[in-house]
Image (cartoon, rainbow, N blue to C red):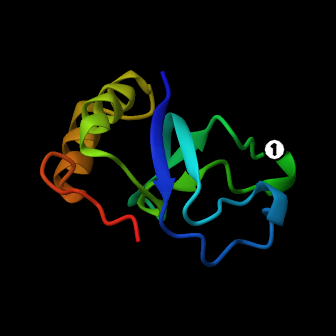
Amino acid sequence: MKVPCICIDDKNRPKQIPQEKWVIKGNQYHIIHVGGTVGGKIPTVSLSEITLGKECYPYEGFRLDRFAFDLKDIPKLIELMKSCSELSKVDIEELVKSYDLETVEPELN
């Protein structure tokens, strides 16, 4: 499953991730996995368009809060979260609540 999203934050690229593997604000991407966290709080996502390899260690994904979603794609995102083994039901409920995924339409500007 792929969930479309738009990058809304491409600032603060870690030096371990080369420019050619970094997201670009305004570009569309497709999330294929949700798992792991940054600082134990912000979930990370894997994109179909960019593979972060061993040279990007310790980074294995991008922070979820770097992306915005069309409201119609939120159910797909939640379904994808449920299929990712790193996340528990409690984690998913917290993500939905903390990002207000059921009610907020993110700004894409």
Q: Disc count in the image? A: 1
Q: Secondary structure at mark 1?
A: loop
- Outermost residue to the left: 103
What residue lies at 36% left-to-right and 49% top-to-bottom?
69
Residue 83 to residue 33: above or below: above
Amino acid type at circle 1 is Gly
User: Along the line of sight, which residue is nearer the eye, 20 or 81?
Assistant: 20
Residue at 42 percent across and 61 percent down: it is 65
Residue 37 shows in the view: no
Furthest residue to the right?
55
Looking at the rendered image, the quarter that the C terminus falls into is bottom left
From the viewer's perspective, is residue 22 above or below residue 32? below
Judging depth in this view, the residue of 25 and 21 nearest the camera is 25
Q: On the rendered structure, is 83 left or right of 98?
A: right
Q: Could you say where residue 59 lies in the image, as x and y percent from the top left?
A: 68, 55
Extreme residue in the bottom direction? 12
Residue shown at 74% from the left, 41% from the top: 51
Across and down, in percent, residue 106 comes to 29, 61
Q: Is residue 74 left or right of residue 47?
A: left
Residue that label 1 marks: 53
Residue 38 seen in render: yes
Q: Quadrant of residue 57 in the image? A: bottom right
| Residue 108 pos. (x, y %) | 39, 64
Quadrant of the rendered structure where residue 21 is? Answer: bottom right
The residue depicted at 72 percent of the width and 60 percent of the height is: 22
Instruction: In the rendered view, tell whether residue 61 sits above or below residue 90.
Output: below
Q: Residues within 10 Å of mark 1 (few under 14, many from 20)?
A: few
Q: Is residue 13 left or right of residue 95?
A: right
Q: In the image, residue 93 lies at what x, y percent?
A: 19, 41
- 20 or 64, nearer to the observer: 20
